[in-house]
Image: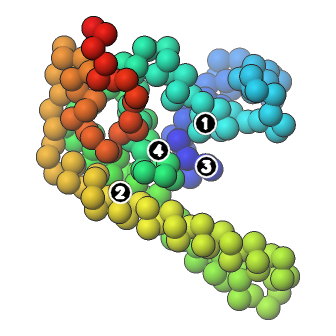
Amino acid sequence: MLDGDWFTDDITERFRQFLRVAFGEEHYEENLKFVEQALNVKGKREYTLRDYFLGEFYNDHIKRYKKRPIYWLFSSPKGSFNALIYMHRYRPDTVSVVLNDYLREFRTKLTAHKSHLEAVSISASAGSAEKTKALKEIDKINKMIAELEEYEREVLYPLATQQIDIDLDDGVKANYPKFGAALKKIPGLDAQDE
């Protein structure tokens, strides 16, 4: 769950594929618009499916499952990186997969995009507005890369080396905390309501 089409298996792209397969290409745009309007409960302008998945999906999921989600969100401290996993498909190497196939790959893609923007920022053919926009985006990407590097170094890599086992019979309340700062914090998860 990222702010753009960085991966082909991104949740937004997978949902779009679902709409195409389930209801046909012929009605795809109409169906997508219907879904986006239905999800836009706050009436925001130009609201997209990606806006829902980035901003509201996980909170909705936590509410629906009464703070015991079946999808777990690996999330960097400022949310530049988000990866959902399905708890019932978890294996001891899942954190390594998130680290190697997604976090590191995303950072590589960000670095490549940054290189492109750096070329734009010094290009003789680029206008001053284009150069300014590129420089702002470079600054944003630098901050994201720093966040991802720290998240990898301090949280995800040490966790990946542990190859944590979970027992589904223990439930979310026992298993979710095993991943500490790697997962998005769920307020009230530790409440004594079971």
| Residue 49 against residue 35 in the figure, above or below | below
Q: CA distance from mark 3 to mark 1?
A: 10 Å
Amino acid type indicated by mark 2? Tyr
Asked if residue 186 lies left or right of residue 10, the reply is left
Percent across and percent down for residue 176 are 28, 29
Residue found at x 75% / y 72%: 133
Verify CB contact (< 8 Å) between mark 3 and mark 1: no
Q: What kind of element bears circle 4? A: strand
Q: Earlier in the sequence, mark 3 or mark 2?
A: 3
Q: What kind of element bears circle 1? A: helix
Percent across and percent down for residue 98 are 35, 46
Q: Disc 2 designates what residue?
A: 151
Q: Earlier in the sequence, mark 3 or mark 1?
A: 3
Q: Earlier in the sequence, mark 2 or mark 1?
A: 1
Q: What kind of element bears circle 2? A: helix
Residue found at x 71% / y 88%: 122
Q: Disc 4 designates what residue?
A: 82
Q: Earlier in the sequence, mark 4 or mark 2?
A: 4
Q: Residues within 10 Å of mark 4 (few under 14, many from 20)?
A: many
| Disc 3 versus disc 1: nearer the observer | 1
Q: Residues within 10 Å of mark 1 (few under 14, many from 20)?
A: few
- Does any portion of residue 87 appear in the rendered image? yes
Amino acid type indicated by mark 1? Gly
Q: CA distance from mark 3 to mark 2?
A: 18 Å
Q: Disc 1 designates what residue?
A: 55
